[in-house]
Image (cartoon, rainbow, N blue to C red):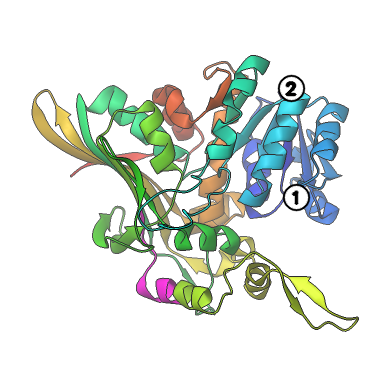
């Protein structure tokens, strides 16, 4: 396998450090709009970097991406950019006849009249519209294969295959007890993506009703997270799992709830109130005349890069899937989860916990595709593949998952 990794930020850099320890690929080209970032990611690998190359690429330029795939003979593109670049990279891979894998799907657009009741354009709709073209090409586009979405979807598949005869509800529940020394507000993940998913109308799935939306931060509940994290209030947030799971797993209700905390929610609400969550450029004075800038990009520029916070972070992050249903005629309720301790990920990989947990899953998936344990064509989510090979390989990577009977 020859991989083009687009994006050398926190997650992309973590991908290189995880992949460098595995033998399944021959070459990984690390490409970024900022060549120095790509070069730094490769240089940090030292002697383990022989199979890596740094390149510059504009992720929004489809012809440039396709040409880079061809130049290095890459058969797979791994997208580690933010969701704005999903579609150009997705189309570039299709045009080049290469496989594709991402960790977040094409962007949604709220319903113009009833945003908190009906779906508009859903996450991933633009990608699934091209499913027939992908199937005809014979190539695989594995979408939503990070941690959430990604591992959470694998957990849903595992529950359906091995743990339940009938599933009433699947709920993704994400929580952490992470703190960052010296900062009152320092998101542990890309703030552009965080604003997008937290302020958009959350989607819920119910059998018989289909997909519908609610208000941001609705239906709060306190969920008890494992391994010392403890109780965290979780709220509805827009996320890909709700759109992916029902395509392949039979469940009567699917939700996603995120443990954000009251202070974080209030900060996001303030950004929205001030219009600082907007992506459309506004014109501001500059030293050489008016400049058009995106308010959300300004917010991102004012906050610390999450990838640089590892030394200041303390605590653990947990991603997991709660499932309720029946097995052998008896009620059953479980929580399948994956916990990463920041102290461990920093000591072992030099990466903070959230970006490492996101990065390990696409690497595991690439290895399964490279070895033929996962195969297919078209646009497929993680639920379309057997879960057990993934979970076994994740444990082999040194990061086991857990199951708690509720």
User: Which quadrant of the view contains residue 297?
Assistant: bottom right
Residue placed under numbered mark 2 in the picture: 97
Q: Tell whether 209 sits left or right of 41.
A: left
Name the N-terminal-most of marks 1 and 2: 1
Q: Please tell me which residue lies in front, 177 or 147.
A: 147
Q: Dot 2: few (<14), some (14–19), or many (≥20) neighbours within 10 Å?
A: many
199 vs 108: above or below: below
Look at the numbered discs 1 and 2 and tell me whether their residues touch, using CB distance below 8 Å: no
Percent from the top left, x then y, of residue 154? 41, 33
Q: Residue 263 lies in magenta, yes or no?
A: yes
The secondary element bearing badge 1 is classed as helix
**Residue 319, relative to residue 263: is it above or below?**
above
The answer to which of 183 and 154 lies nearer the viewer is 154
**Residues packed near mark 1 inside 10 Å, few (<14), some (14 to 19) or many (20 plus):** many
| Disc 2 element | loop
Rendering coords of residue 300 (x, y %): 64, 69
Is residue 286 highlighted in magenta? no
Location of residue 204 with respect to 362 vertically, above or below: below
As drawn, the residue found furthest toward the left would be 330
Q: Can the viewer see residue 3 in this picture?
A: no
Where residue 310 sits, quadrant-wise, is: bottom right
Give how far across and how far down residue 240 sits, in percent: 46, 44
- For the N terminus, the quadrant is top right
Residue corresponding to mark 1: 41
Residue under the point 80% across and 31% down: 69
Please state the extent of the stretch shown in magenta in the rendering.
257-266
Q: Nearer the viewer, residue 124 or 97?
A: 124
Q: Quadrant of residue 95?
A: top right
Q: Residue 313, image x and y in percent?
A: 51, 67
Residue at x-position 53% and y-position 59%: 196
Looking at the image, the residue that sits furthest to the right is: 288
């Amino acid at each position: 396998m020859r991989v083009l990794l687009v994006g050398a930020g926190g997650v992309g850099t973590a991908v290189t450090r995880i992949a460098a320890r595995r033998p399944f690929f021959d070459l990984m080209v690390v490409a970024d709009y900022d060549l120095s970032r790509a070069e730094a990611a490769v240089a940090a690998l030292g002697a383990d970097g022989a199979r890596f190359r740094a390149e510059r690429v504009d992720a929004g330029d489809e012809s440039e991406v396709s040409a880079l795939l061809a130049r290095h003979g890459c058969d797979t593109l791994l997208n580690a950019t933010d969701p704005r670049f999903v579609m150009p990279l997705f189309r570039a891979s299709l045009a080049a006849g290469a496989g594709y894998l991402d960790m977040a799907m094409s962007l949604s657009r709220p319903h113009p009249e009833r945003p908190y009741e009906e779906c508009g354009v859903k996450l991933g709709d633009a990608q699934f519209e091209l499913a027939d073209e992908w199937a005809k090409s014979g190539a695989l586009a594995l979408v939503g294969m990070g941690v959430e979405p990604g591992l959470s979807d694998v957990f849903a598949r595992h529950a359906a295959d091995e743990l339940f005869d009938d599933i009433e509800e699947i709920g993704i529940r994400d929580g952490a007890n992470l703190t960052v020394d010296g900062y009152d507000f320092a998101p542990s993940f890309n703030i552009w993506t965080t604003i997008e998913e937290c302020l958009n109308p959350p989607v819920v799935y119910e059998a018989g009703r289909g997909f519908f939306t609610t208000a941001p931060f609705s239906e709060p509940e306190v969920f008890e997270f494992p391994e010392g994290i403890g109780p965290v209030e979780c709220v509805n947030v827009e996320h890909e799992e709700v759109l992916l799971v029902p395509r392949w797993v039979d469940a009567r209700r699917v939700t996603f709830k995120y443990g954000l905390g009251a202070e974080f929610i209030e900060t996001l609400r303030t950004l929205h109130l001030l219009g600082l969550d907007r992506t459309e450029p506004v014109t501001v004075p500059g030293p050489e005349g008016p400049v058009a800038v995106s308010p959300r990009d300004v917010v991102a520029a004012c906050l610390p890069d999450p990838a640089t916070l590892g030394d200041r972070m303390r605590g653990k992050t947990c991603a997991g899937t709660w499932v309720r249903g029946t097995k052998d005629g008896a009620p059953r309720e479980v929580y399948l989860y994956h916990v990463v301790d920041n102290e461990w990920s920093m000591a072992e990989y030099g990466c903070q916990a959230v970006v490492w947990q996101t990065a390990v899953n696409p690497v595991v998936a690439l290895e399964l595709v490279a070895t033929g344990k996962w195969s297919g064509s078209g646009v497929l989510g993680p639920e379309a593949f057997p879960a057990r090979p993934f979970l076994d390989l994740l444990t082999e990577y040194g990061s086991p998952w857990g199951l708690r009977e509720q």
